[in-house]
Image (spheres, rainbow, N blue to C red):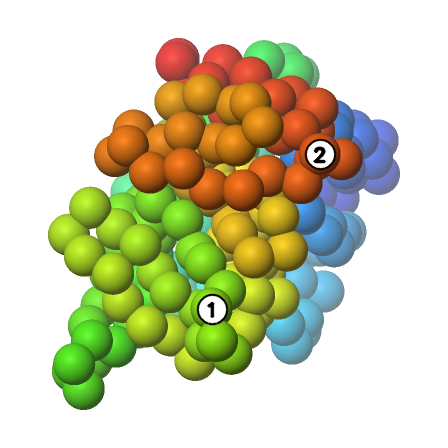
């Protein structure tokens, strides 16, 4: 997941980057960050951002104008405005702002906002799989686990089992949302469906999957943080 930080104050950019790193440590999710000091620099960036923290009051082109230009090309980017004044909040509706964060930044507010933004992205994400020669779209949140079998991967959901030509490494990148964990070389599990962790993992549909011994402690930590994050 690629997160952009655009603010003309270096101290704010550094603080947001630090908070992103703290979020990564807490949630065992891979996040890359890229920083911009003004709107012009951001608009010239070639890669696609998943989430953008954007200061409203910047020198040169301000945050609202920058967001308007972004929306001309990208409707899906999650934009989170940074502002010191509540009066700007109404203006964000026309550029489909996800949320506002008030300055000075509070760590708890940041963590909750970033968690909500990632959850919002992943709950609406879909992947293409196949069954009996048909192409099917399923939401990532519906996946219970991915299993490697006979050079293919099997996608297990409560509605059925689907075959995919994607490799486990590709699934691992796609499912890098904080909700999934690669418990074994042959399994990636959605932590939402884990009931018990022992020598095997018991899922809430009654199935059991293998877990590598070296992954057990990391998995337990990830599950604890996942439950805490989604209990709010």
**175 vs 224: above or below:** below
| Front position in the image: 55 or 61 | 55
- How far across and down, in percent of the image, does residue 198 sit? 55, 23
State the CA–CA distance, disc 1 to disc 2.
21 Å
Residue under label 2, please give it: 213
Q: Quadrant of residue 21?
A: top right
Tag 2's secondary structure? helix
- How far across and down, in percent of the image, does residue 153 sit? 44, 69
- How far across and down, in percent of the image, does residue 65 sit? 48, 56
- How far across and down, in percent of the image, does residue 111 sit? 58, 23
Side (left or right) of 165 relative to 38: left
- Residue at x 33%, y 38% (from the top left corner): 207
Q: Residues within 10 Å of mark 2 (few under 14, many from 20)?
A: few
Residue under label 1, please give it: 149
- Residue at x 70%, y 24% (from the top left corner): 217
Quarter of the image containing the N terminus?
bottom right
Quarter of the image containing the C terminus?
top left
Side (left or right) of 89 relative to 10: left
- Residue at x 56%, y 57% (from the top left corner): 186
**31 vs 24: above or below:** below
Q: Residues within 10 Å of mark 1 (few under 14, many from 20)?
A: few
Q: Work out whether mark 1 precedes mark 2 in sequence or the reverse, and give the earlier one.
A: 1
């Amino acid at each position: 997941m690629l997160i952009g930080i655009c603010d003309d104050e270096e101290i704010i950019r550094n603080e947001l980057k630090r908070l992103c790193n703290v979020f990564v440590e807490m949630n065992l999710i891979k996040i890359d960050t890229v920083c911009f000091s003004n709107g012009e620099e951001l608009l010239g960036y070639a890669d696609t951002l998943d989430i953008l923290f954007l200061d409203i009051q910047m020198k040169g082109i301000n945050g609202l104008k920058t967001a308007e230009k972004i929306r001309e090309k990208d409707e899906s980017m999650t934009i989170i405005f940074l502002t010191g004044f509540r009066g700007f909040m109404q203006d964000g509706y026309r550029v489909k702002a996800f949320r506002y964060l008030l300055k000075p930044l509070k760590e708890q507010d940041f963590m909750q906002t970033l968690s909500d933004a990632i959850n919002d992205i992943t709950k609406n994400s879909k992947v293409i799989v196949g069954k009996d020669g048909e192409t099917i779209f399923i939401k990532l949140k519906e996946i219970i686990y991915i299993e490697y079998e006979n050079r293919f991967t099997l996608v297990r959901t409560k509605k059925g089992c689907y075959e995919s030509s994607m490799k486990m490494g590709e699934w691992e990148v796609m499912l890098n949302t904080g909700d999934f964990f690669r418990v074994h070389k042959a399994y990636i599990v959605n932590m939402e469906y884990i009931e018990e962790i022992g020598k095997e993992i018991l899922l809430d549909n009654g199935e059991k999957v293998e877990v590598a011994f070296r992954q057990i402690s990391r998995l337990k930590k990830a599950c604890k943080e996942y439950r805490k994050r989604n209990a709010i």
